[in-house]
Amino acid sequence: MDLYQAVISELEKAPGVTILIHKSPDGDAIGSALALALVLEARGKETAIYCWDGVPYYYRFLPGWQRVRKVKEEGEVVFHPLVVGLDSSDLGRLPFLRDKPPGTVINIDHHPTNTRWGDLNLVEPQASATGEIVFGLLERWEVEITPHVATALYTAIFTDTGGFRFSNTTDTSLLCCYKLVDLGAVPYEIATNVYESYSSGRMRLLGLALGTLSMAAGGGVAWVVVTREMMETTGTGPEDTEEFVNFPKSIRGVEVALLFRETEEGVKVSFRSKGRVDVAAIAASLGGGGHKAAAGCDLDLSLDAAVERVIPLVEEALSCCLSSTCS
């Protein structure tokens, strides 16, 4: 029995499934969770989806988004006999847990830095998104993929490939989305909801963030900063900073872009690379992780200290790659 069949067997026999997704949930985590929950519920199984944070407003067009329950303590979670963690590379991404969840745990993810924290680890680093893995799982399971499920999975893949702009876009991800459109997903409606339904506060926040644009390494590194005061002034939240890091990345000559966002605990750093620099390696050295071209970490530092800590590491990595002394 291969790993996909092993996961299907566990899903088939479980009377209920608890689904966990990472903090600051993105379209991939939310879409994957909703798709799996919809399929399980159609097969008569109880499901519950938990996350440290709520669903960002621009993903609230997804069918069943209200299923995602915001929790801060493990005691608020109802653990069914089977637990599925989606798009979470390690347990640190699930801060409401004290330890590995009880019961049988299935870990489905596409991050190369995944720590294989489940009993079954369906981890496919070559996949563009966790939604791509879930779609493959549902196809092998031969369950009905309704238009609602197709919408959730298309959103997962569409957002994690940056609207098919990122280097993780492959023939497989495009073929999956082709099939999902045939199954009822509507690309225009999804793109409009995801990328053209922002608040006016977000636009003001973006203006403030772009005003902090800084560059180093002869224009090879660029970053912006978002403070808590900026978010308070504009009436926005952390979800409104999604995609901000792609603005400095879009500058000609920039190889690595970063977003430093101030949090209650310190600073969240988002990294993006155009391919030469492995930002997952940098993030991992700081306690984070991700992909070669997209990664992140959380630092218990002030904003200024975080910038002073991270930028020299990025400059060193870029210099190394440009001099061909590292891969």
Image (spheres, helix red, strand yellow):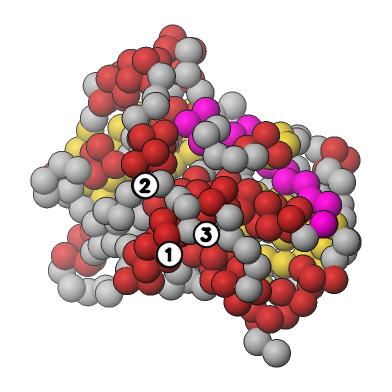
Q: In the rendering, at what x and y percent does residue 99 appear? A: 80, 55
Query: Which circle marks residue 153 in the picture?
Result: none
Please tell me how many numbered marks the rendered image carries. Answer: 3
Cβ atoms at labels 1 and 2 below 8 Å apart: no
The amino acid type of the residue labelled 1 equals: Lys
Q: Residues within 10 Å of mark 3 (few under 14, many from 20)?
A: many
Q: Which mark is residue 131?
A: 3
Disc marking residue 179: 1
Does dot 1 land on a helix, a strand or a loop?
helix
Circle 3 — which element? helix
Tell me the residue at 79%/50% (across/down).
Answer: 47
Image quadrant in which you'd find residue 24: top right
Residue drawn at 65 percent across, 74 percent down: 141
**55 drawn magenta:** yes
Question: Residue tagged by mark 2?
Answer: 187
Q: CA distance from mark 1 to mark 2?
A: 12 Å
Q: Is residue 61 left or right of residue 142?
A: left
* N-terminal-most mark, 3 or 2: 3
Quick check: 46 left or right of 199? right
- Image marks 1 and 3: residues in contact by CB distance under 8 Å: no
User: Disc 1 and disc 3: Cα gap in Å?
Assistant: 13 Å
Q: Tags 3 and 2 in contact by the CB under 8 Å rule?
A: no
